[in-house]
Image (tube, rainbow, N blue to C red):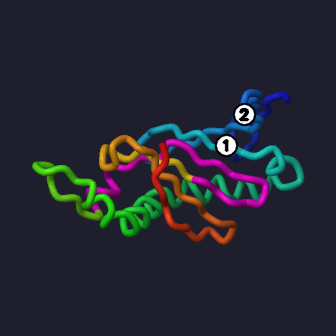
Amino acid sequence: MEPFDDPVLGRVEWNAEFDFWVARFVLPDGRSVEFEIDEGAIGPRIQATRATFRWVSEHEIALRDQLAERMLDLARTWKQSGEPEITAASFAERVRLTAAALDDADALTLYYADGDMFGGHLILVNVGADRLMNAPYLAG
């Protein structure tokens, strides 16, 4: 499939190895995040895909804050002795969004680096088409 340029998504390229489209967005801190797009979310559904792309870009800080609220107690149980106390603010500061994946049902999976709070595991968060965050979980 041929890459294309979109006025909102920017350069969109096909990842033939994993069968999805890839765009990138830049967070306020300057980091680039991969936005993986299911094949069915391009074409007639491009407007919804653009809206989701904007939504993730605009709400990334609030998403980290919400993630901190949901995972703070667990992070404290993983804390090693001698490490500084983990607060909601420090949790939100430490985790980093590394990728977002949009499926053809307009649901998202957000991938966060754990900020060394969970032994290097990824934090995955499913966000429904209603844009409500489901329970985050550890992977890897």
Residue numbers of the magenta segment: 89-109
Give the residue at x 83% y 49%. Answer: 40
In the figure, is residue 71 to the left or right of 21? left
Find residue 51 and report its image quarter: bottom right
Q: Earlier in the sequence, mark 2 or mark 1?
A: 2
Dot 2: element: loop
Q: Which residue is mark 2?
A: 18
Front-most of 51 and 18? 18
Q: Is the residue 117 above or below the residue 13 in the image? A: below
Labelled pair 2, 1 in contact (Cβ < 8 Å): yes
Horizontal and vertical percent position of residue 61:
43, 58
Q: Which residue is mark 1?
A: 36
Dot 1: element: strand
Horizontal and vertical percent position of residue 44:
89, 53
Q: Is residue 48 magenta?
A: no
Give the residue at x 53% y 58%. Answer: 125
Front-most of 11 and 72? 72
Q: Is residue 92 magenta?
A: yes
